[in-house]
């Protein structure tokens, strides 16, 4: 299936579901931001996504405010004060 056909099929499914059609980019970004915290390194992720360099990958890994808040909640010193050993 070509890009235009995939986009049309996705738009039709979204219409039937009564929702706004997601961008195909959204699926690639979801893959990238899901696989990275699970232990995949940047070089491997870049290759899995078919990129020739890490600069292209940076577009997919652009962090949203929610991403930053979650990272701070998981690893910030205030929320994890009892877990640290000094």
Image: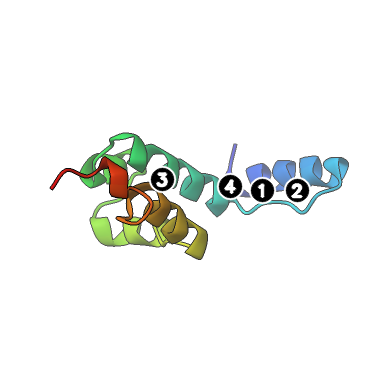
Location of residue 57 with respect to 9 vertically, above or below = below
Tally of numbered tags: 4
Q: Position of residue 67 (x, y in %)?
A: 46, 56
Q: Position of residue 9 (x, y in %)?
A: 73, 41
- Label 1 secondary element: helix
Query: What label does residue 72 carry, if any?
Result: none
* Marks 2 and 3 close (CB-CB < 8 Å): no
Q: Residue at x 34, y 34 (%)?
A: 38
User: Which residue is identified by label 1?
Assistant: 7
Q: CA distance from mark 2 to mark 4?
A: 12 Å
- Label 4 secondary element: helix
* Marks 1 and 2 close (CB-CB < 8 Å): yes
Q: CA distance from mark 1 to mark 2?
A: 6 Å
* Marks 2 and 4 close (CB-CB < 8 Å): no
Q: Earlier in the sequence, mark 4 or mark 3?
A: 4
Location of residue 3 with respect to 60 vertically, above or below = above
Q: Quadrant of the N terminus?
A: top right
Pick whichever, 86 or 39, lies toward us. Answer: 86
Pick whichever, 61 or 69, lies toward us. Answer: 69
Q: Earlier in the sequence, mark 2 or mark 3?
A: 2
Would you call the spot at circle 3 few (<14 residues within 10 Å), some (14-19), or many (20 or more)? many
Would you call the spot at circle 4 few (<14 residues within 10 Å), some (14-19), or many (20 or more)? few
User: Which residue is identified by label 3?
Assistant: 32
Camera-near label (2 vs 3) is 3
User: Which residue is identified by label 4?
Assistant: 3
- 6 sits left or right of 26 in the view: right
User: Which residue is identified by label 2?
Assistant: 11
Q: How is the image coloured?
A: rainbow
Q: Residue at x 45, y 52 (%)?
A: 70
Residue extending farthest left:
86
Q: Residue at x 34, y 44 (%)?
A: 50
């Amino acid at each position: 299936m070509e890009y235009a056909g995939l986009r049309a099929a996705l738009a039709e499914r979204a219409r039937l579901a009564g929702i706004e059609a997601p961008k195909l980019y959204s699926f690639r970004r979801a893959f990238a931001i899901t696989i990275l915290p699970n232990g995949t390194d940047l070089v491997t992720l870049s290759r899995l996504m078919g990129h020739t360099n890490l600069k292209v990958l940076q577009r997919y890994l652009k962090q949203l405010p929610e991403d930053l808040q979650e990272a701070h909640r998981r690893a910030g010193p205030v929320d994890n004060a009892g877990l640290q050993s000094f």
